[in-house]
Amino acid sequence: MRTSFGPLLGLALTIVSTPALAQEEEAPAVTVTGGATVVSDYRFRGISQTDKNFAVQGTFTVAHKSGFYATVWGSTVDEYVAAGGDQEIDLIAGFKKTFGGTTVDVGVLYYYYPGAEQIIPGYSSDFFEPYIGVSHTFGPVTGKVSAAYAPKSAALSIGAGKEDNLYVAFDLSGGIPNTPVSLSAHLGHSYGPSFLTIGKGYTDWNVGATYTWKNLIFGVSYVDTNKALLGPISGKNISKGGIVGSVGVAF
């Protein structure tokens, strides 16, 4: 279950050639960015997906100047997340456009858990989640409101039948001028009941900071919820507040 992910530095890949005598280099038609990160705990909407242990994550995005983009994001997870599977792969397709200082981002995300269906024959933990986000920049600060809705499916059901899930969030982020430090804050609410909320809906929040040095990104955040949820294997409170650290490299 995908988390938000910190700022990444991009490596532009020009697909169309630029005339040799051009005064200015044209903007690339397609850009390719990616990165890899190690986190001390993979939190999805405040809840640990790794039983409060480390996770290895990676991402790869191809974006066209028209606004269309496609992303593959992956992480290790604990087996309680998806019927015994230990991987999560998110496949994302979307469209992002900026109008003045306002950016609109719409798309659909597919959560894929390879191997989970092998543990329980005929069962699938995979599901779709369309999303929309609107952000606006005020000087060095960007505010964003977003919503993601997962339609009814058996994968979201706690027992028999089908359930759906709605998640709404508000984010603030910005860099400290003339420094490599960025700050962020997040507030979100999950509406249940579904497998994503394990019963009643709940609220999650976090505050964090990142430090960028060349292609390396160091992050630290405090993540918490108003929910009490015990891991089914270890008995740890996987929704309890805690500090999450990360080290990543971007290209």
Image: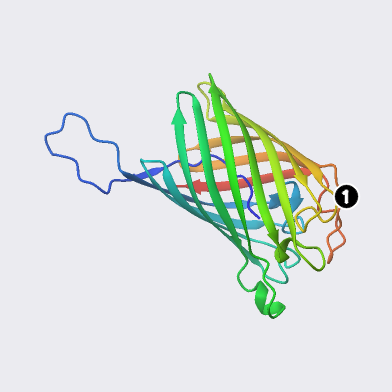
Tell which of 234 and 92 is nearer to you.
92
Furthest-top residue in this view:
139
Q: Quadrant of the N terminus?
A: bottom right
Residue 27, percent from left and from top? 29, 36
Residue 22, percent from left and from top? 15, 33
Residue 179, percent from left and from top? 53, 25
Tell which of 159 and 87 is nearer to you.
159
Q: Is residue 173 left or right of residue 228?
A: left
Q: Residue at x 49, y 24 (%)?
A: 101
Q: Residue at x 67, y 72 (%)?
A: 116
Is the residue marked by circle 1 packed among few (<14), some (14-19), or many (20+) residues within 10 Å? few
Q: Look at label 1 and name its amino acid.
A: Ala
Q: Is residue 111 above or below residue 22?
A: below
Tell which of 201 and 186 is nearer to you.
201
Q: Is residue 234 left or right of residue 22?
A: right
Q: Residue at x 70, y 50 (%)?
A: 44
Q: How is the image coloured?
A: rainbow
Q: Is residue 206 above or below residue 231?
A: above
Count numbered badges in the picture: 1
Furthest-left residue in this view:
21
Q: Is residue 153 left or right of residue 58?
A: right
| Residue tagged 1 | 228
Q: Is residue 151 left or right of residue 175?
A: right
Q: Is residue 5 visible?
A: no
- Say what secondary structure mark 1 lies in: loop
Residue 103, percent from left and from top? 50, 32
Displayed quadrant of residue 52: bottom right
Q: Is residue 161 visible?
A: yes
Q: Is residue 46 above or below residue 74?
A: above
Displayed quadrant of residue 226: top right
